[in-house]
Each structure stands twice: as structure tokens, then as C-alpha cells.
Amino acid sequence: MRDFNTEYKKIYELVSDDVERVKKVVFAEFPDNNPVLERLAEYFSTPSKHIRAVLSFLYLRSLDISIDDKQILFQTVIELIHNASLIHDDVIDDSKVRRGYLSLNYSEGNHLAVILGDYVISKALKLLCKLHNAEIFELFSNTMSDMCLGEIIQQNSLYKIPSLEEYIDKTYKKTGALFNMAIAGAINISGCQGYRVSNFAKSFGIAFQLRDDIKNVVENSVNGDIKNGIYAAPVIFGGSVEKYSSGIEKAVGLSDNYIQSAVSELKNIKDNKYKTALIELTELLKYE
């Protein structure tokens, strides 16, 4: 059995210099003369996979597209949006821990955590303005709308078993949409056209969330999503909360279908180490 973290670290190293540039821009946005914002900076320093940036940089480099300052700026925007959503999610879910550390809603309180999440989004918008790209602004608007709608759908369907179609739609909105923005936006900025990046990003994003959902059910069946009324693929396929275990195999099969779909979207890219890493990263999403 492959260890995700070990394999991911090898892939990460291929674009680690690019990701480090993103991290530097992120930290430059938080002044060190305010104790609350210093704690926010500490939040951003906690261990993170930076998987959206890694995926985007691998995709760009597989196409021989150079990583210029605009690309770094854009992936910084993605990083900020993602973390703002996590801060808000922790408030909604009353989560105590994030990445092994006390969450901001527990260290600073819910009210301040919400404001800090909004503050992070304001920083993302400031950086987005520097790109002077109307299409990117539209992509940002649509993505933020999708992410909010995904959360609304989830909150409105608590303790209800959704149809598979409803679940996939919610999963794309909550998770896949930002993966799509990360890669589609990067391609837009590069000026390259004709790549079906959205199909790859959508399939990758859904498979990514499916893996998390399956792990949550298997490893936290007592205190995880099921207890909180969030019913994912295993429950849908099992037909009831009590029979979630009977739906795990089909949920894994569904995830594998999206993984295969994502990999198939890479076939037209010429063979190189970055394409190989993209395929390996996608296949790491398999639940084993």
C-alpha cells in the first residue's frame, strides 16, 4: 500500500520552488504589527499540502508554460480563498482542530474568526485586481458563488440522504469549483487556448472530495460527518445511515471512475516528468 504523504512529498518537490514563492506572497499580506493578524499568519504557517498550487504548477509545466509573477500572484489568490473557506467552515462545523492545531474559531472566537475569514478574502481580491483580467474576475465570481451554494445545499440537506446527482453537484460546488478556478485561471493567464482543463479539474476535484468523504466515514463513523448529518457517497449507496458500510465499495468505485476520467484528460499532453507527476498525483486519490 502506498503512503499518500510519502508519495505526495516526492511530487511536491518538482514544483516546491514555485510553491515557496506563493507562500512568500501570502505572508507579505499580513502585517506583523497587530497581534490578531500575527496569529492569522501563524495559521497560514501550519502544515498544508498546497495541493491546488501544486496541481496547477504541474499542469503549466507539463505544457512548457513558464511560471511568471502573474501565475504566482494568481495561485496566491487561490491559496487565500481556500484558507478563508476553511476558516469559515470551522465556524460552521464548530471544529476545534485544523491541521493539528487549534482552529481560529476556538483560539479567537467565532465572531473574530468570521471577520478574519472575510479579511483573507479581501486580501485575495486586492491581489486579483493586480491581474487586470476581466475573465479571471468572472471566474472568481462564479467560483465564490458555487462554493457558497455548495455550503447552502449541504446545510439544507442535513440528516437527509441526497440523490447521487445532488451529492455530486454539491461536491463540485464545494470542492471542484476551486480546483477548476486554479487550473483554468492559470491557463487563461498564460494565454494558451484549446486545453480541456475544466474536465480534468472537475474530475480531480470530485475524486479529491470523494476520497475525503470515504475516509471520514470509515475512520470517524461515530464522531464524523454521519453524526453531523452530512451523508456522503457511502450512505447514499448503502441506502441508509445504518448500512453505510455496504456502500463503501461502490463509493470507492465512483471515485475510481472520476480518477480515470481525470487521467484520460491528460492523454494529449506530451510525455514529460510533470505529466507523469500529474498522473501519479491523480492516482494517489485512490482510496486504499
Image (cartoon, rainbow, N blue to C red):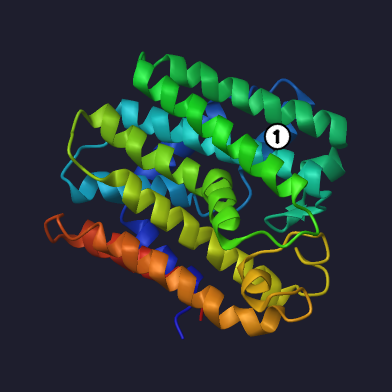
Q: Is residue 286 visible?
A: no
Look at 67% across and 23% down and name the residue there: 119
Q: Quadrant of residue 161?
A: bottom right
**Percent x, y of residue 267:** 18, 61
Residue shown at the point (20%, 51%) measured from the top left: 62
Using the image as rendered, state which of residue 46 and residue 166 is in the foreground. Answer: 166
Q: In screen coordinates, is 281 left or right of 37? A: left
Q: Residue at x 47, y 69 (%)?
A: 255
Whether residue 165 sits left or right of residue 64 in the image: it is right
Q: Nearer the viewer, residue 35 or 125?
A: 125
Residue 184 higher or lower than 250, as above or below = above
Residue 229 is at least partly visible in this image? yes
Estimate the x, y position of residue 5 in percent, counting from the top left.
Answer: 50, 69
The quarter of the displayed image where residue 218 is located: bottom right
167 or 107, which lies in front?
167
Number of dots carrying numbers: 1
* Image position of 260 with respect to 95: above or below: below
Q: Secondary structure at mark 1?
A: helix
x and y, in percent, of residue 282 in the image: 37, 64
Q: Amino acid at mark 1?
A: Leu
Residue placed furthest toward the left: 270
Q: Residues within 10 Å of mark 1 (few under 14, many from 20)?
A: many
The quarter of the displayed image where residue 212 is located: bottom right
Residue at (70% x, 40% y) in the render: 152
| Residue position marked by numbered label 1 in the rendering | 40
Picture coordinates of residue 269 (x, y %)?
15, 54
Q: Is residue 15 above or below residue 80?
A: below
